[in-house]
Amino acid sequence: MILSEEQVDTFFDRGWLVVPDVFSSEEMMQGRQAFDRLRQTSFRLRTTQTHAGAYFVLDETAHGDVIIKRIVWAGGMEPSLLDLSADRRLLGPALQLLGSSQCEQLLCQAHFKMPGDGVSFDWHQDIQHRDKGPGTWRDINGRGSYVQTIVLVDEMTPENGPLQFIPNDAVRFDGSGRISSGHHDYSTPWSDRQAFSQIDETRAVTVTGGAGSVILFGPYAVHGSTANTSRMSRRILINGYAFPGANGRIYPGEGSGRRLELA
């Protein structure tokens, strides 16, 4: 899959891009089966730990029910998810946006929002998880050096904990310029910088879509999500692709940080 010039402009100008119906219902059925197995394993493990090549980040309610915060490098346990993350329909657009023929895959995460589990995420930028101080991250291509993709394993509705984004031009860093366009000091590690100081929440956009749709965004896009208040699950597969040489960290999971290129 090749993105159009308009889609590329949308990604960099607005901060994110939605591409509907990238994967078929049959492919997403296989994805849901993999997620079901991961969930059943979480119930057996019950506490945060590495298991079968994946890192399970788990919590529990006051009643002892397991809450899945995330499963890092989920493809370590479920190789079909790694196959999906290397599919040219995901990898092609990621490489196109990175401006590279190769990339380093940092993430293959399974995120669950089950009815009533209360899982939500405040406004944040993913650079906060990539740049952890000296030697951990470099923006080599000058445009963030990172592309994150989200595959909707289930339909994403306004009620089941959808993602929300703040457009780039509604975010200010330290009272100055737009974060995602590079108008700040890249030489200072993210952990030593002030986070975004002002966002216009009235400009927030709620993203919905059918299973098999894909969301792409960069490391400076401000986003978050609310809790699932519906009766249906909201599961997504997150894959993160870095420009070669940008990352200096070791991520959890057997095989994480692998090099990918289009066959």
Image (cartoon, grey):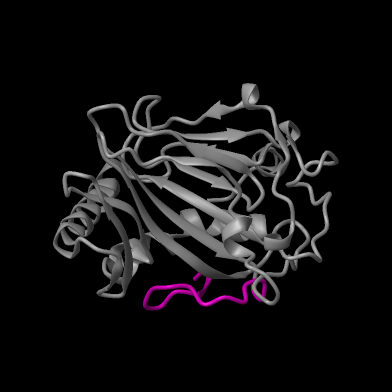
The answer, for residue 239, to whether it is visible in the render is yes
Q: In the visual, does 89 lie left or right of 38?
A: right
Span of residues in magenta: 244-263
- Give the percent coordinates (x, y) of residue 158: 40, 25
- Give the percent coordinates (x, y) of residue 32: 24, 49
Which residue, as the protein is rendered here, is positioned at the far front?
Answer: 62
Q: Number of numbered discs present?
A: 0
Front-lying residue, 96 or 110: 110
The answer, for residue 262, to whether it is visible in the render is no
Front-lying residue, 119 or 181: 119
When the figure is inspected, residue 32 is found, relative to residue 48, above or below; the finding is above
- Give the percent coordinates (x, y) of residue 160: 34, 31
Q: Quadrant of residue 73?
A: bottom left
Q: In the visual, does 182 lie left or right of 255?
A: right
When the figure is inspected, residue 43 is found, relative to residue 153, above or below; the finding is below
Residue, x 26% and y 40% (percent of image)? 114
Residue, x 63% and y 21% (percent of image)? 202
When the figure is inspected, residue 139 is found, relative to residue 150, above or below; the finding is below
Any magenta on residue 246?
A: yes
**Magenta part mainly helix, strand or loop?**
loop
Q: In the visual, does 110 lie left or right of 124?
A: left
Residue, x 44% and y 54% (percent of image)? 238
Q: Quadrant of residue 204?
A: top right
Front-lying residue, 79 or 2: 79
Any magenta on residue 138?
A: no
Residue, x 29% and y 47% (percent of image)? 28
- Give the percent coordinates (x, y) of residue 230: 28, 27
